Image: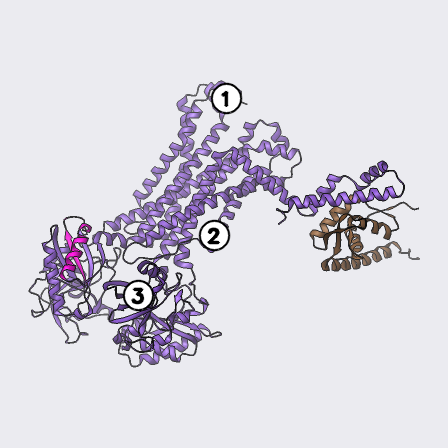
Amino acid sequence: MENPVELLQGTLDMLILKAVSLGGLHGYGVLLRLQQLTGGQLQIQQGSLYPALYRLENKRLITSEWGESENKRKAKFYTLTAAGRKQLRAETDLWNRFSDLVAGVLGAIPEES
Amino acid sequence: MKLFRRKQFESDMDAELRFHIDIYIEDLVRLGIDRGEAERRAGIEFGALEATKDECRQAWGLRRIDELRADLRLTLRTLGKNPGFAAVAILSLALGIGANTAIFGLVDAAMLRILPVSDPGGLVFVQNAGAQGVNGGPPYPCFELLRDKAKSFEGVAAFSASNMELVIDRGRELAQGVWVSGNFYQLLGVKPLIGRTLSGSDDQTPGKGGPDGAVAVISHAYWQRRFGGDTAVVGRTIRMFEHTVTIVGVMPPEFMSLEPGRPIDIAAPMMLSNPVMLRERGSWWLEVVARLKPGVRAEQARAESDAMFQAYMMDVTISPAIRKLAFDRIELAPAARGMDRLRRQFSKPLTALMILVCLVLLAASANVANLMLARAAARQREFAVRLAIGAGRGRLIRQTLTEALVLVGAGSALGIALAHEGETALAAFFAEGGNKIILDLSLNGRMLLFTLSVSVATGLAFGLLPALRAARVDPAAGLQLGSRSVAGSRPTLRLGRALVIMQVALSTVLLAGAGLFIRSLRQLESVDLGFTRQGILTMEVTPERELYGKPEWLRLQREILDRVGRMPGVRSASWSTMSPLGGRDRGVIVDVATFVPRTETDKDIHLVSVSPEYFETFGVPLLAGRAFTARDDRTAPKAAILNGTAAHFYFGDANPVGKKVRFARVPGDPVYEVVGVIKDVKHESLREPPPRFIYLPIPQSIDRINRLALAVRSSGDGMELAAPVRKEVQSARSTLLITNVSTMEKQVRLSLMRERLVSTLSMTFGALALVLAGIGLYGILAYAVTRRTNEIGIRMALGATKGGVVRSVLGEALALAGSGIAIGVPAALALGRVAKALLYGVQPFDVPAFGWTVLLLLVFAALAGIVPARRASRLDPMSSLRSE
């Protein structure tokens, strides 16, 4: 197995939005889904999820609701808001353009002289 | 909201994080890791719990609120520890803000307030205008034309204030009334409180009214005062002049008529007023108000009304010159704030007061800024420590600003309470006397908004300076130095001195202003009235209508003078159609054969009809010829007396006695012989020189005699005779209506109401500023002495005497005061020039006013310096040297 990849600065919010967009999750669920989606290759400090979740909720991009978890415990579930959906779309778009750009630059072949 | 859900937030956050860790542990256990190891790994992989929580709080936006709370707590604690500081600061602010709120309330009530009618912006007054400016609306027939034909208006209404003679429960009484066209209240969109309001159908037939007969509505205040708020008043009938009138409604407390400040008791339809006036095409007694149709521009409406007015004026007989002066054209004026009588009367004094009160606030703010500075300086060590252990400079600035805003908040709250007290006193000031002005000075939203913005502005203004200064502390230097030397940092002291000098300058302006206003008032109070004011009782006596102009009324007048004349303490009694400063006037036109008028107004003269005793009762000196006697009766040759101004105007230096004057406009073209000249008597106001006056004997008057003023000169102050004279008059005839009982001294005082208002308030503000400057001076001197403890110790050790030390401190006090005065005097002069219209008999540079100001300030400065000076002189050289 390769070494886990460190999270790029500023991308956590986007990943959380994506994770939550696939269906309501509690914080631990977000973590599991991100690990699942990345094949366990992404290194996330577990605690750092929460300030990000709180920040997103404070910005009204996600909302929370107390509910019951799979193992019958009270847990806080997050879902995407309309604003969050829009934000996710915008960020995805931006990220795709950015990564194409970076890939283009890095993939440049030296010109033959 | 976030503030109050704090506990909930914390427990939710705990539960959420706990859930995460717990479930992770369980998952690890399920994978076969033993529980102890699982817990350890979960803890490590989660990261520092408390740090995470704090980041969550910050992400949620709670950090700012937490800090604000901490700031507030710290502020309250530090203020609690320095009650003296807090008290002086809060009280200074309360006085400054309170005075501002009170005066703004007055400005609001008298000048700014929009009337509580529907869509006030669409209302306009339709007014006659000419070279002399605007005055009132067109005559009644022209109003009817506008109401029925003008296409620019949704509606046109008329009104005219008038005294109403009422008989309620068989007693005659006088009420303040207003004649209104039937559509008046509907046009304004005012709904009655109980019953119904007047309508167009109530105003159809002259002398009758409408289908319900003669009706009227009463004001809320009159309903409370006269009928005790009894709802059964609706449907009650009363006599109003010669009509039996049914009261059909009570109007709401906030609206009765369109004249702000004028209390109106009762409103009745135009058709019940004098039918002659309604018919006359050249009687100018109405005010006309109209509502513009939506989309119609004011200029369009003006042009239309003017065209109708010009057509109407074609068959009105009026001299072209008079027409040019006053009735040349129609102009429209916005009516949202009602008629501008009050605004015209008070705009200058209120502007002056508003300026003065702002200066007071500035002085108060300077005081607080100085206190804050001193405190910030004293706390530099604390700030240095906080900076050194990691506080941000922004936090320190915020802390200081919080403190300032807390002080301002407390100051404003107290200030509003003070303003409320002040408003009561001010309202009483206005409500005094016969022509009382009723202002609603209760707090309203606009006033609170004003206070709030003033407070926040002051808070920021004086809080920011110390705050920035506090944040400039260098932690290293601050920690190294002893507390005392830090407290004395030079820039702080320099800034403090500048603030104190500003305070003294402001006090100079306020005190000098107060001096000028007080001296003006004194001048006015001692102005030569032309009559002796002491001991004259006056009252107005109105007979029933049937007696107007009848010989029986003349006989009754004689009988009353005889009866009153016999009363103990009475020296003289007389009748006249009006008394000086009584607010009434009568203008006529006179022709003098030898005099060629240059303008139409040269023929104007004011007329008073008097009984023979009049000049004696008022103590008016005779300059030439004779006074009237009982022989100048109906059948005798017609006699007239002129005042000095009129005699000189018409006859120059020639002796007017024996000359003839003619009233060409009066039926019969009567000619009167001038038999005497009396000294000028102030009539309308104490400021204006008296205009031309002609006096006629009551039996020979060109006017029909109805209401008369009775004047009684006594050996006392006059008022003690009020009840006995009233009784005597009514025992001559019980139905005589007696109103406006007063004394000439009181009339003089009332006519100076504006001047007294301005001088009383400016004196109060001056005193306030003086005290504030005193506190400021004391503060800065005490502070300077503390700072100089070392230096003074050294000086004394080297042989300086106690006297020398006292002199040096007092010298500083006087130097500060002197600098302030040097700035304040020119500023006061400049303001005095601006306020010249409010002054009387005093130049802006009035030596006594400025002399007293300077003296007072120097005395206060010396007083403020004495305590610190003595403390300095009592310093023990040894201990003060050791104090470092």
Q: Which residue is mark 1?
A: B880
Mark 3, chain letter? Answer: B
User: Disc 1 on helix, strand or loop?
Assistant: helix
Mark 1 or mark 3: which is in front?
A: 3
- Measured in 3D between alpha carbons, the distance from the residue under mark 3 to the one under mark 2, in whole angstroms, is 34 Å
Amino acid type at mark 3:
Gly
Horizontally, residue B588 falls left or right of residue B779, namely left
What percent of the width, then of the height, locates residue B169? 25, 63
Mark 3 or mark 2: which is in front?
A: 3
Mark 2, chain letter? Answer: B
Horizontally, residue B546 falls left or right of residue B826, namely left
Mark 3 vs 2, N-terminal side: 3
Compared to B252, does B789 lie above or below?
Answer: above
- Residues packed near mark 2 inside 10 Å, few (<14), some (14 to 19) or many (20 plus): some
Give the magenta-colored segment's residue range. Answer: B708-732
Compared to A61, does B172 lie above or below?
Answer: below
Residue B721 belongs to magenta span = yes
Kindly identify which numbered label has been placed on residue B177: 3
Give the chain letter for brown.
A
Amino acid type at mark 2:
Leu
Q: Residue at x 87, y 48 (%)?
A: A40
Residue B720 belongs to magenta span = yes
Q: Residue at x 87, y 54 (%)?
A: A106
Mark 1 vs 3, N-terminal side: 3
Give the chain letter for purple.
B
Kindly identify which numbered label has been placed on residue B448: 2
- Residues packed near mark 1 inside 10 Å, few (<14), some (14 to 19) or many (20 plus): some
Amino acid type at mark 1:
Ser
Compared to B226, does B425 lie above or below?
Answer: above
Quarter-wise, where is residue A17 in the image?
A: bottom right
Q: Disc 1 vs disc 3: Cβ atoms closer than 8 Å?
A: no
User: Disc 2 on helix, strand or loop?
Assistant: helix
